[in-house]
Image: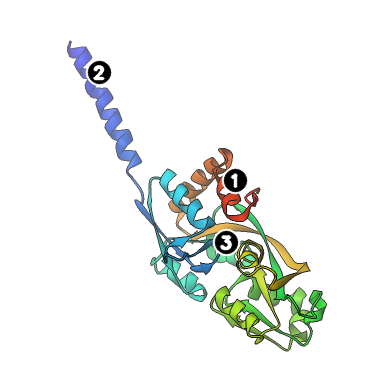
Amino acid sequence: MKKLLALVMGLMMMLMMVAGCGSDGPKKMVIGLDDNFAPMGYRNEKNEIVGMDIDLAREACKRAGMEVEFKPIDWGAKEAELKSKRIDAIWNCFTVNPEREKVYGLSKPYMVNAQLVVVPKDSSIQKIADLKGKVVAVQDDSTGSYLLELPENKELKDSLKDYRKYPDFAAIYMELDNKRVDAAIVDAVLARGYYDKLKPGQYRILDENMGDEVVAIAFRKDDKEFLQRIDKAMDEMKKDGTCKKISEKWMGADITKY
């Protein structure tokens, strides 16, 4: 009887230790995003933040045992927001590039994307070379602005009449509508997945693009726990088809094949 009691007590202690280990680590993750970036993260008619990245983040955090909070931020200040710990992650179609790899801790890529050139439907611009002498819009501190600063794109940049930076893509499309800019460099997920449906036939996408890219989630460079827990959850979601299902819901196709 004593041996049985000791065995039961030992098992209970082991269970308590396992439970205790499971309770370690962060209980909540605050995600920073541009809430004008449809269909990845934006406000619907009820002023709720919705989108493909929102659905992915909710499910991943649930599997990682964390609550999630979405916090709209100034995209140009995203690095400062993360370093000051006002947010824990940037999950908003965040493109991987060499400069960002130096600054952020990045998850495994989970999506493919591209930078496209969007013009009004009646524009005379047919190819990237036609941007010479034109005014081009980009989002501040975005992949579009990064690409224009690359040495290999110096000739293109120097040929422009001007290129202007805006806080979000809603402002950029407003400038296109009002003819204050001639073209915009826009993420493919936004150009094809939202504005083409919102205002069908109003814009045209050039056949040439500014470059293909992969998308990841950004964390503080030294913050391994959030990264590892989200990577594990996203691996499970890719394997069981959840990422594919969410992508098809928002994009009509699976763009998480990476």
**Whole-percent x, y for residue 258 in the image:** 65, 49
Q: Which image quarter is the N terminus in?
A: top left
Residue 92 appears in the picture as rendered: yes
Disc 3 target residue: 93
Q: Secondary structure at mark 3?
A: strand
Q: Residue type at mark 1: give it.
A: Lys
Q: Residue type at mark 2: give it.
A: Leu
Viewer-proximal residue among 197 and 193: 197
Disc 2 target residue: 7
Disc 1 target residue: 244
Q: Which-is-in-front pick, marks 3 and 2?
A: 3
Label 2 to label 1: alpha-carbon separation: 46 Å
Q: Which-is-in-front pick, marks 1 and 3?
A: 1
**Whole-percent x, y for residue 118 in the image:** 70, 73
Q: Earlier in the sequence, mark 3 or mark 2?
A: 2
Kindly indicate whether the residue at mark 1 contacts the one at mark 2 (C-beta within 8 angstroms): no
Q: Give the quarter of the image for residue 136.
A: bottom right
Viewer-proximal residue among 219 and 65: 65
Kindly indicate whether the residue at mark 3 contacts the one at mark 1 (C-beta within 8 angstroms): no
